Amino acid sequence: MNSSEYLDYPKQILEYMDGFFVSKTMFAACELGVFDVLHESDLALSAAAVAARLGTSVDGTDRLLSACVGLKLLKAEMKNEEAFYANTDISSIFLAKSSPRSLYHMMMFHSHTTYKCWHFLPEAIREGKNQYERAFGISSKEVFEALYRSEDEMETFMRYMDTIWNIFGKDVLTAFDLSVFSTVYDLGGCSGGLAKQFVSVYPESTITILDLPKVVQTAKKHFITDEEHRISFHEGDFFNDPIPQADLFIMARIIHDWTEEKCLQLLNKIYKSCKPGGGLLLVEVLLNEDKSGPLTSQLCSLNMLVKTEGKERTPSEYSKLLTASGFKDIQVKATGKIYDAILGRK
């Protein structure tokens, strides 16, 4: 497209404008169970058959299925002038709720929580603070309490976190050789998704998840089995309670939640508990040093604005925080995916 055609037809702008149509279509299909019904069926189904199983309108279901075909989340075959639908491979793997690699809970968290906060992005930019209060009518003083308004919502958030580390865990844990660390604490380890990946990669090490009591209890109930004996739990608040000594501390998607002041408060505390020769592994979304990208990281930083006190940072910004807390020999490794790894040593 030459410059005059570009100005006559701003395709990029129009696609960006309608971007939320795409995400909400996918979220709705997940929430209604479209991918599950088709995953469980041995045969392609008509819109009427899918609607009957979901208890939805035939017309609305037909439009939704057609849009999912356009998004390449479903495939359609015409028989006697009627479309019959089936999942694509990627939908069966990542969008069917029963799949071991399902992103269903991630979709639901974004649809029910993140999307509502993003509605108030202009207010977040004007005020420089998260928008939980406007989005949900609750106090934003303790934003993470908002994630756990009910046991069901807490489990949804924890399954979302579990999904992340099923996909990205091994990449960040193998960015550096962590086999030299025998005792490991995963601070804010939530569901234990990253801990499970850790013990699979480093079978000689043990790892302890330190998190709030109700998070630990939910993890024990729904996520960690008795067979995973090299994973243990420590109930506590890492800001307010003592942090036991360890060879390695892991903080995955934690530092980006907080202001510089709180980051330094926490990092200084971890440094004191870190054994000599030990280390701290940060797992975060990194911005380019010149802030030119990646786009995913830039959008994640806006997400931190509408939902937390924090932001995404550049490698040098994380290195500065770690150095100010006493850590040295800072190394940064890009995984080529969304999450990267930063390692500091004591």
Image (cartoon, rainbow, N blue to C red):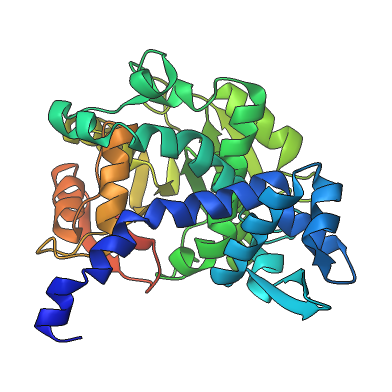
Tell me where residue 93 sits by quadrant. Answer: bottom right
Query: Foreground residue, 279 or 72?
Result: 72
Horizontally, residue 289 falls left or right of residue 108, namely left
Q: Is residue 302 above or below residue 45?
A: above
Give the residue at x 86% y 61%: 40
Q: Position of residue 279 (x, y in %)?
A: 35, 53
**Numbered disc total:** 0
Q: In the rendering, at what x and y percent does residue 130 appear? A: 29, 28
Residue 127 pos. (x, y %): 16, 26
Is residue 164 visible from the viewing direction of this image? yes
Q: Please state if 83 lies on the left or on the right of 238 as rendered.
A: right
Residue projecting furthest to the bottom: 2
Q: Could you tell whether 80 is left or right of 336 in the image? A: right
Question: Between 72 and 186, which is closer to the camera in this rendering?
Answer: 72
User: Which residue sits furthest right?
Assistant: 42
From the viewer's perspective, is residue 310 above or below residue 15?
above
Q: 55 or 138: which is nearer to us?
A: 55
Q: Is residue 337 left or right of residue 66?
A: left
Residue for point 42% across, 21% down? 241
- Residue 294 visible, this angle: no
Outermost front residue = 81
Residue 123 image position (x, y, % from top left): 21, 28
Q: Quadrant of the N terminus?
A: bottom left
Q: Which residue is at a point 37% across and 46% down the rendered structure image?
A: 275
Residue 298 is drawn in which quadrant? bottom left
Q: Compared to 3, does 66 lie above or below?
A: above
Picture quadrant where residue 238 is located = top left
Q: Residue at x 32, y 56 (%)?
A: 285
